[in-house]
């Protein structure tokens, strides 16, 4: 993986073109030969891929004039990937697909209308002790929003891995769980079915690794994630 040396013509890149892939690791910039693996995928991954294909197909049905509106809105939206220099922006297609995926996750898959991307409120989360509901782990999660008069506009998406205490996080094992209720003053509840088999053992205490995201039910857009790990008891 040779390190890329920026030049006067190219000072940054991210992604693939031809047989070359540019990427960042630990703050450095590298290139490698582009791989072309055969994608097997789990059932969940294949479903996600199918949703993505539907999103791209849906965008192709959007009139050109509306696509230009998406492009104008996206010109003010910074990417969630490096470099975070406030100079780059995403494409109109990225913004459209983001909204499409968001509405699918909310159980409301449809052709999204162009919406301005507004900054999400600051938020913090806290997990409480969980209960077992016929083999499903039910975790109350307190979502504390910043100054926000319409907290119910947002739903919490938790990408979680449940394991034995002391085990580290495996990003490939994180799975999506949408909270039952909109955010508000009361805790929302995240349900993890078949949690014992996922954790590998029936225990009184579990390690939960997670990435927590707010979904905007009006636009379908998602916030940056909070990365947190917790120990919870199953009572």
Image: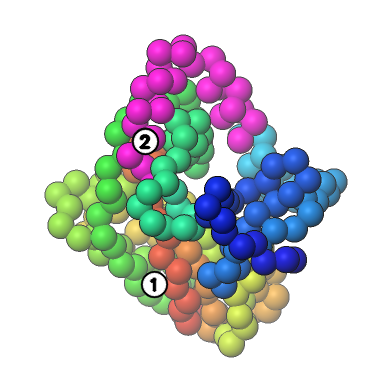
Q: Residue furthest right?
A: 38
Residue at image point 63% right, 42% down: 48
- Residue 177 in the image, given as x and y percentages of width and height: 51, 55
Label 2 or label 1, whichever lies nearer to me, is 2
Question: Which contiguous range is marked in magenta?
Answer: 52-78
Quadrant of the image containing the N terminus: bottom right
Rendered image: mark on residue 127:
1
Q: Nearer the viewer, residue 149 or 72?
A: 72
Residue at image point 68% right, 46% down: 16
Residue at image point 52% right, 60% down: 159
Please, is residue 48 above or below residue 140 in the view? Answer: above
Q: Is residue 185 magenta?
A: no
Examine the residues drawn in magenta and state their main secondary structure.
helix
Q: Which residue position is annotated with label 2?
A: 75
- Residue 62 in the image, given as x and y percentages of width and height: 48, 16
Q: Quadrant of residue 118?
A: top left
Q: Is residue 17 left or right of residue 11?
A: right
Q: Is residue 232 left or right of residue 136?
A: left
Residue at image point 67% right, 39% down: 49
Asked if residue 116 can be seen in this view, the reply is yes
- Residue 105 in the image, given as x and y percentages of width and height: 49, 42
Asked if residue 12 can be seen in this view, the reply is no
């Amino acid at each position: 993986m040779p390190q890329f040396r920026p030049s006067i013509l190219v000072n940054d890149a991210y992604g693939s073109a031809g047989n070359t892939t540019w990427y960042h690791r630990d703050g450095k910039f590298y290139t490698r030969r582009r791989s072309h693996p055969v994608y097997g995928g789990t059932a969940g991954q294949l479903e996600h891929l199918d949703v993505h294909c539907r999103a791209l197909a849906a965008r192709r049905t959007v009139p050109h004039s509306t696509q230009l509106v998406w492009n104008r809105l996206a010109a003010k939206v910074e990417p969630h990937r490096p470099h975070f220099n406030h100079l780059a922006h995403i494409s109109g297609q990225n913004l459209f697909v983001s909204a499409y995926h968001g509405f699918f996750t909310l159980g409301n898959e449809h052709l999204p209308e162009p919406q301005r991307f507004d900054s999400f409120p600051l938020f913090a989360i806290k997990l409480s002790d969980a209960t077992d509901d016929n083999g499903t782990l039910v975790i109350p999660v307190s979502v504390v929003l910043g100054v926000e008069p319409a907290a119910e506009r947002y739903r919490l998406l938790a990408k979680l891995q449940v394991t034995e205490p002391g085990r580290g996080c495996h990003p490939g094992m994180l799975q999506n769980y949408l909270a039952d209720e909109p955010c508000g003053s009361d805790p929302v509840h995240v349900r993890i079915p078949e949690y014992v088999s996922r954790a590998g053992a029936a225990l009184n205490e579990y390690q939960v690794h997670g990435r927590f995201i707010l979904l905007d039910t009006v636009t379908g857009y998602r916030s940056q994630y909070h990365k947190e790990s917790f120990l919870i008891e199953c009572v």
